[in-house]
Image: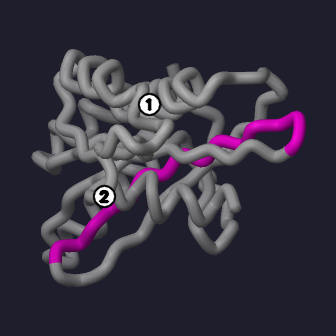
Amino acid sequence: MQYQTKQWRKLTGEYLRNYIEDEVHGALLREKELGHSLKVCIGTDSQVKGAHTEFATVIVFVRKGRGAFMFLNNETTREKMSIKQRMMTEVSKSIEIAYHLSNVFTNHKVDMEVHVDINTSPAYKSNAALKEAIGYITGMGFSFKAKPEAFASSSCANKVVQ
């Protein structure tokens, strides 16, 4: 299945012209030619805005010691969700794109992590989804990071939904 390119864009707002897997492949080739060592982090965050919930998913390309860049997309739903359901929807959106792109990352020998905007402290409501999220992500064979190390979801995607 190929993802529509009109949904994915750069942080500048420029829409990607090709399918996301082709754009990621091209980005990895360009960065490799420039001598950059990369790690990719995928994360999703959401924001409830009245009757709507907006989700932002990001693919962050971290150039070790040389900054980062990202591709992103937004989706909106009118479905009412509990906090746990919303957290697991975020995880599901990240897993979906990570799984879709996993062969590209494997072929380029690039490490990839799934970042979740779920707090590891039981004092926070999002923590109710932590065990299920960890099981889902690791069960799919991916590495994960949760708050406070999950910058792709907690910082990058968060800035796109505010």
Q: Are marks 1 and 2 in contact (CB under 8 Å)?
A: no
Measured along the vertical axis of the image, is residue 143 above or below residue 157? Answer: above
- Give the residue drawn at x 51%, y 32%: 87
The residue identified by callout 2 is: 148
The residue identified by callout 1 is: 91
Which residues are the magenta region?
A: 50-64
> Which residue appears farthest toward the right when viewing the image?
51
Position of residue 46 in the picture relative to residue 66 (left or right): right
Position of residue 87 in the picture relative to residue 76 (left or right): left
In the structure shown, which secondary structural element does the residue marked by tag 1 occupy? helix
Name which residue type carries label 1: Val
The tally of labels here is: 2
- Give the residue drawn at x 44%, y 31%: 91
CA gap between label 1 and label 2 equals 16 Å
Q: Position of residue 85 (x, y in %)?
A: 57, 21
Single out the mark in the foreground, 1 or 2.
Answer: 2
Q: Main secondary structure of the magenta part?
A: strand
In the structure shown, which secondary structural element does the residue marked by tag 2 occupy? loop
Q: Quadrant of residue 162?
A: bottom right
> Which residue appears farthest toward the bottom when viewing the image?
66
Disc on res. 40: none
Name which residue type carries label 2: Pro
Position of residue 47 in the picture relative to residue 33 (left or right): right
Is 23 or 126 nearer to us in this picture?
A: 126
Is 130 or 35 nearer to us in this picture?
A: 130
- Give the residue drawn at x 34%, y 38%: 122
Q: Does the image show residue 138?
A: yes
Q: Quadrant of residue 142?
A: top left
Q: Position of residue 140 (x, y in %)?
A: 24, 19
